[in-house]
Amino acid sequence: MALIAFSPLADNGSCAEATKTAKAREAGAGRGGPTCLGLVRRWQGRILAAAGLALLPWLGYLAGTLPPAEAAAWVTLDALEAAALLTAGTRLLRADLRHRTPAAAAAILLFADACMDLATAAPGPDLSAAIAMAVAAELPLAALCARLAARPTRGARQGV
């Protein structure tokens, strides 16, 4: 799954061929087939997939350093975040319209993680680290995921 996120789609470098007709656009949309993705959309998918992959070693660190009761809760939360981010990122890269549900789940989980980090951090360096993680990583990713989940689909019919 991770290799798909960082390799270009097999469209022989020709975006014009995939977008010539409405039929070609409809055939590829939502089915995971190769379609022309905008540069912004590719970067959004890569960012989400990379964030999901970056959480995987973090899970091992948490499991090894936290007390067992705390480790179970934090590892579960971060594993769900990683799964949602990887799913949303790879689906976005494949132009699959089903990227919206895992993006919404990731937004909620990331926001909850930031709130819990801030609420449980001890004053001092722990609180400073929690604020830095929330401002630099968790909340911007949650905002991106919320935007991806809420934006209307290009091919969706209006008023139906």
Image (tube, helix red, strand yellow):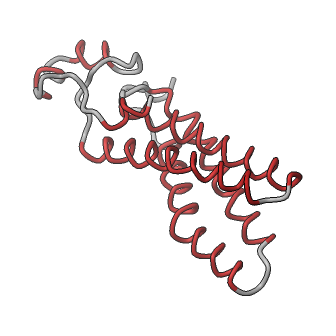
Observer-nearest residue: 47 or 59?
A: 59
- 138 relative to 115 in the view: left or right: left
Q: Quadrant of residue 158?
A: top left
Q: Quadrant of residue 64?
A: bottom right
Q: Is residue 18 above or below residue 103?
A: above
- Indicate the position of residue 47 as horizontal and vertical percent values: 41, 49
- 110 relative to 9 in the view: left or right: right
- Indicate the position of residue 104 as horizontal and vertical percent values: 60, 42
- Indicate the position of residue 2 as horizontal and vertical percent values: 42, 34
Observer-nearest residue: 113 or 75?
A: 75
Please, which residue is most extreme toward the bottom here?
Answer: 124
Give the position of the N terminus as an image quadrant: top left
Q: Residue at x 79, y 59 (%)?
A: 66
Q: Residue at x 52, y 48 (%)?
A: 145
Q: Quadrant of residue 15?
A: top left
- Indicate the position of residue 135 as horizontal and vertical percent values: 55, 71
- 20 relative to 109 in the view: left or right: left
Q: Residue at x 26, y 24 (%)?
A: 35
Q: Residue at x 48, y 53 (%)?
A: 144
Q: Is residue 144 above or below residue 23?
A: below
- 155 relative to 51 in the view: left or right: left
Q: Is residue 89 above or below residue 34?
A: below
